Image (cartoon, rainbow, N blue to C red):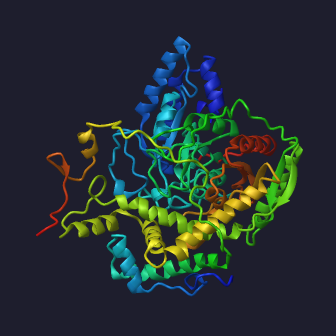
Amino acid sequence: MPPGAPAAIRRGTMSVTNEQVRHIARLARIAMSDEELDRLVPELNNILGWVEQLGEVNTDGVEPLTAVIDQKLRLRDDAVTEGNIRDEVLANAPEAQHGFFAVPKVIE
Amino acid sequence: MTELTSKTIAELRDGFRAGEFSAREIADSFNGAVAAARTLNAYTVETPEDALAAADAADKARGGGDIASLAGIPLGIKDLFATQGVDTTAGSRILKNFRPPYESTVTANLRKAGAGMLGKLNMDEFAMGSSNETSAYGPVISPWRRKGSNVGLTPGGSSGGSAAAVAAHIAAGATGTDTGGSIRQPAAFVGITGIKPTYGRCSRWGVVAFASSLDQAGPMAKTVRDCAILLEAMAGFDPKDSTSLDLPVPQWEANLSSDLRGKRVGIPKEYRIDGVPTEINALWDRGIEWLQDAGATPVEISLPHTKYALPTYYIIAPAEASSNLARYDGVRYGLRVEGVKSLDDMYSATRAAGFGAEVKRRIMIGTYVLSAGFYDAYFTKAQKVRALIKQDFRKAFEQCDVILTPTAPSAAFGIGETTDPLAMYLNDVFAVPASLAGLPAMSVPGGLDEQELPLGLHLIGNELDEQMVLNAGLAIEERARFTARPEKWW
């Protein structure tokens, strides 16, 4: 364990609670029953406990990788290259009305 | 005459050009074979008319003398590639009935080269899996069986439909995608060849996104030469993908050579891991001898961060997936669950009904490691370790030209035999490091194990050096002389 490693990543020190998993499911917008949550908590703890071994690696002074193959991001002209395809864009919508995507009523 | 479906792409191409058979005959043979092999569950959609139309165009072009590189070659397309007007579902309920109004760049390139499409190939949902068991269509069954057994085996994953189709001769070749081994592990499981090129060689445009910093398309085929032919057609600069490499596509096929004199083969000592069957390590040793026989010199190398590659991957890939899969919200395409009270409930109910268990698990992990308070401890840490893994390879390639390892830590396993997610993730222990480093890597069949199931050898090349990977693969192919075929039971 390198001295500079963050406490949060020490192996086995983290474990998520039922309440936290409920919160994550809410952030991820996935509805979950209590049974599903109960099943998921130990699974996630298993996986998270395993990835925490990264805490052993000394990464002091290491820049996080941002591009796996060095390359410059290109700029392109700010021009319309495709357009007038509204009906194609809407063709797969579960519900489209008057040329728009339609969703359930948001404001009562 | 050998059946047309058992020929390599190179043989089909050359025979078609020489007038030995028509493209129509090729397409008819494959369409018939596809329809007769539905037990394998390899195809989610069959498009025989597409293969025939491409064949007729090829036959017509042959009369005129202007023949495209893949004219008359019918391929299977992994269901992760958007195909215009043809269902593209990524193996997920949430994309049920999705028909893209556009074509992915890779498949458009293949069409431009004259290839026809036999259909869409089954896969793990959103390419998340190593056994094809997470598909909403049910698992693909491998054409292979253990000696004296009729237990259904997995063809590996996530490109399991592609692997099974090539192995069962119901596609001349197939597209696959590889995020952490999804071309190479299934290729090894079914005794075929598959290459993941350098990150950025093949455009990701129109490929349903899983983990964008890792996703790469590549070919799966019977031989190394066929992979070279297909990859040349698939690869190329695409302004629509910001990470597409703006480089000319090398002539990989023309430059194939199994003469490895003067080349050094790196043997990473960290890949000798506990619990790997001795047969796999024995095959690895045979692979070293084969490459020596081709003129190469083996050198021991060290990739010290190897053991951290899988945990790094299982932070980065779910993190990117949780972000990419946020788009499935029931608004613009795909499934929508009706009868809910609010927009927010519609999102949650749709995603709960549309995603399978493994996809949910990864979205949850990804959401957690990116959430406030944990981002640095998990995600930033993983990107730092990823930089160290990349650096390991950079140093290794100062000492060697190509790296040889086993492809997977086991032969194919039975459907339903691996239920623990972590045990499933370990399938990619040898494949994932090259993915994290964006390097070209290939699986080539090496032999059979005691159960008479195929085992693969894995070659990793330096950035942009697909040629070295293909050449070393060819040297192994010529020496392994892998001709075993599954006995037809389907």
Number of marks in the image? 0
Seen from the viewer's position, the closer of residues A68 and B490 is A68
Residue, x 58% and y 57% (percent of image)? B156
Above or below — where is B94 with respect to B110?
below
Residue B169 lies left or right of residue B298; in this view the side is: left
Image x and y of residue A100, in percent = 19, 49
Image x and y of residue B347, in percent = 28, 65
Above or below — where is B431 with respect to B476?
below
Seen from the viewer's position, the closer of residues A46 and B242 is B242
Q: Which quarter of the figure is the N terminus of chain B placed in?
A: top right
Residue B249 lies left or right of residue B394; in this view the side is: left
Residue, x 52% and y 58% (percent of image)? B132
Image x and y of residue B153, in percent = 58, 59
Say if residue A41 shows up in the picture: yes
Quarter of the figure with residue B230 = top right
Residue extending furthest top?
Answer: B64
Residue B450 lies left or right of residue B413; in this view the side is: right
Say if residue B426 shows up in the picture: no
Image x and y of residue B79, in percent = 45, 48
Seen from the viewer's position, the closer of residues A38 and B312 is B312
Above or below — where is B381 with respect to B122?
below
Quarter of the figure with residue B488 = top right
